[in-house]
Amino acid sequence: MSDPETPNQPLLRASAAEGGRPSKAYKVAGITLLACVLIAGQAMVAYFLLSQRSDIRSLEEQSNNLKAALTKGRSVSAPIRMDMPMNALPKMMDDFVDEEASTGAPEKSAPQPATDCQLEAAHLKAVQVPGFQPSCDERGLYKAQQCYIKHCWCVNPVNGQQIPGSLREGPVRCRAPVFAGSMSKVLTLPDVEV
């Protein structure tokens, strides 16, 4: 096919200096190359989609199986009972054993509610420092000195609040007035030797 206006025009010019614009052959070659790249890209996309079809089907089947398994039977997970560490339990066992030994028959009494210190030590209540486990006394109150890693500090035994300025590296002596509650009762704590 030739251009009707210029029937004798060659596809390539004899010299590059004749004109500053690319010849018709370069334009045709560029458009042809672009069309080939686009067609090849579409062919690659189609190939990858067809080759992945079986993988997509198996993933859909697995997803449907998991959904069916989750909706079957149990719809709500049962709570898991957490084990309480021995140092967090009050001496309820000793009282129970003494009571049973004195009467000969076990008596059922109302269990004592766990204190905040016992709940935190058993990891049933969140603490401010992750991984910290407070020390509790036999009544379930916080021990005056609390330690974590290498640092120790004094706390109010009633609510476990840190006494400002008591944080030290290593053991501390906790003998300071502690304000408990809104009535501002002053409690004196015994010296703690560790």
Image: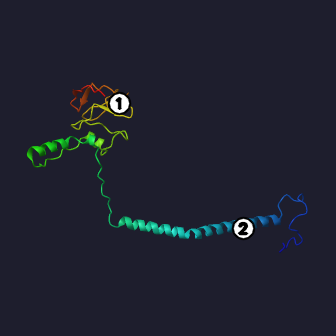
The label shown at residue 32 is none
Looking at the rendered image, the quarter that the N terminus falls into is: bottom right
Q: Nearer the viewer, residue 191 or 9?
A: 191
Where is residue 36? Give x, y as percent: 72, 67
The label shown at residue 152 is 1
Where is residue 2? Give x, y as percent: 84, 73
Q: Nearer the viewer, residue 150 or 26?
A: 150
Where is residue 16? Give x, y as percent: 88, 59
Relative to 44, is 188 above or below?
A: above
User: Residue drawn 33% across and 41% down?
Assistant: 127
Marks 2 and 1, how far apart at CA: 75 Å
The label shown at residue 36 is 2
Secondary structure under badge 2?
helix
Relative to 180, is 4 above or below?
A: below
User: Residue drawn 85% across and 57% down?
Assistant: 20
User: Residue drawn 68% across and 66% down?
Assistant: 38
Disc 1 residue type?
A: Cys
Where is residue 94? Give x, y as percent: 18, 41
